Image (tube, grey):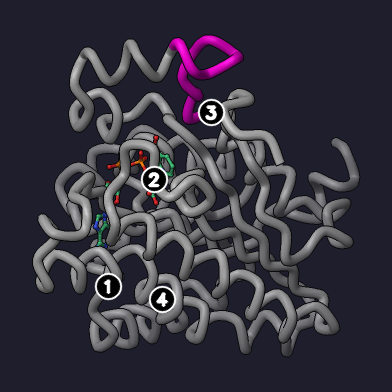
Amino acid sequence: MDSRKQELMGRLAMVTGAAGSTGFAIAKALVEDGLRVLLVDIDAERLERLCNQLGEAAIPVPLDVSDPDRVAVVSAAIRADHGEVDILINNAGILSNNKAAETTPAEWRRLMAVNLDGAFYLAREWLPGMKARGWGRIVNMCSLAMKTGGLTAGTAYTASKGGMAALTLSLARESAAHGVTVNAIAPAYIKTPMITEQLSEAQREQLLLQIPVGRFCEPEEVAFLVCYLISPLAGFVTGEIVDINGGLHLD
Ligand SMILES: NC(=O)c1ccc[n+]([C@@H]2O[C@H](COP(=O)([O-])OP(=O)(O)OC[C@H]3O[C@@H](n4cnc5c(N)ncnc54)[C@H](O)[C@@H]3O)[C@@H](O)[C@H]2O)c1
């Protein structure tokens, strides 16, 4: 086996939003690379079903990442049962396409809580151990929306992803000297229910005309990028926000 892959074998990874299309593709790719993977999601039933497809290396963790008390309790249980997390993929997220005036304060808070606060709670839980051991990887899921102001995405979603980008830079700076990299991915229009169900047929057709590659992104393509960012050979890449948008936005 490839010696770089061998370095990852048996490490413990956590993927949030793992019952969703992108999260599951990421978890599956990590299991296939020989990692033990904690699949975290608020949807316990779906999570259980998906974990059964991946075998023993997949461990279901029902959790609302926006609840700091539950994050602390569940993290303590994980530590006792499975050890420390080496690789954290903060992928859980919810979408709203509402622009400012249509966004209620409660909706604003919920988007921030799930899309941004959850990543912070989990990073503060697992990053100290990574730094102490001198190795770790964090990958945060941003979005093209934070660069464009949201072509279709709403105000709270766009702002939450902008916060995620700044969180990535801050964590990267504090971790770089400790063997821990922190990066983000900024996808656009992955083929998931977020676009198949939350956009109209007319919006989808219009978007396809604008994406130079001429199609939507496959979840497996995002998973492959995660596999690169967590690999031992990506140790010099940190504080980077990697675009995966089919040429929709070039910078
Ligand atoms: N689909 C896209 O086009 C697109 C584009 C850019 C960025 N993203 C980002 O990619 C990530 C994954 O999106 P997706 O398209 O796979 O969405 P998805 O809806 O398929 O998956 C999201 C998952 O997060 C889970 N979740 C929601 N709230 C949670 C909570 N409080 N705690 C734990 N889990 C929770 C959901 O149950 C779901 O399984 C999100 O962060 C999203 O913002 C998606």
Q: Which of marks 1 and 3 is nearer the N terminus?
A: 1
Of circles 4 and 1, the one toward us is 1
Along the line of sight, which residue is nearer the eye, 131 or 199?
A: 199
Of circles 1 and 2, the one toward us is 2
Q: How far apart are marks 4 and 1 (CA)?
A: 22 Å
Find out whether the residues at labels 1 and 3 contact each other: C-beta distance under 8 Å: no
Q: What element carries label 4?
A: helix
Q: How many labels does the image show?
A: 4
Q: Is mark 2 on a helix, strand or loop?
A: loop
Of circles 3 and 4, the one toward us is 3
Q: How far apart are marks 1 and 2 (CA)?
A: 19 Å
Of circles 2 and 3, the one toward us is 2
Q: Earlier in the sequence, mark 1 or mark 2?
A: 1
Q: What element carries label 3?
A: helix
Find out whether the residues at labels 3 and 4 contact each other: C-beta distance under 8 Å: no
131 with respect to 128 (left or right): right
Label 1 beta carbon less than 8 Å to ligand 1 = yes
Find out whether the residues at labels 4 and 2 contact each other: C-beta distance under 8 Å: no
Q: What residue type is labelled 4?
A: Ile
Query: x%, y% of residue 56?
Result: 44, 47
Along the line of sight, which residue is nearer the eye, 151 or 92?
A: 151
Label 3, residues with CA under 10 Å away: few <14, some 14-19, many ≥20: some
Q: Is mark 1 on a helix, strand or loop?
A: helix
Q: Which amino acid does label 1 sit on?
A: Ala
Along the line of sight, which residue is nearer the eye, 59 or 64?
A: 64
Residue 192, disc:
none
* Bounds of the magenta segment: 209-219
Residue 113, disc:
1
Provide the residue designation for mark 3. 220
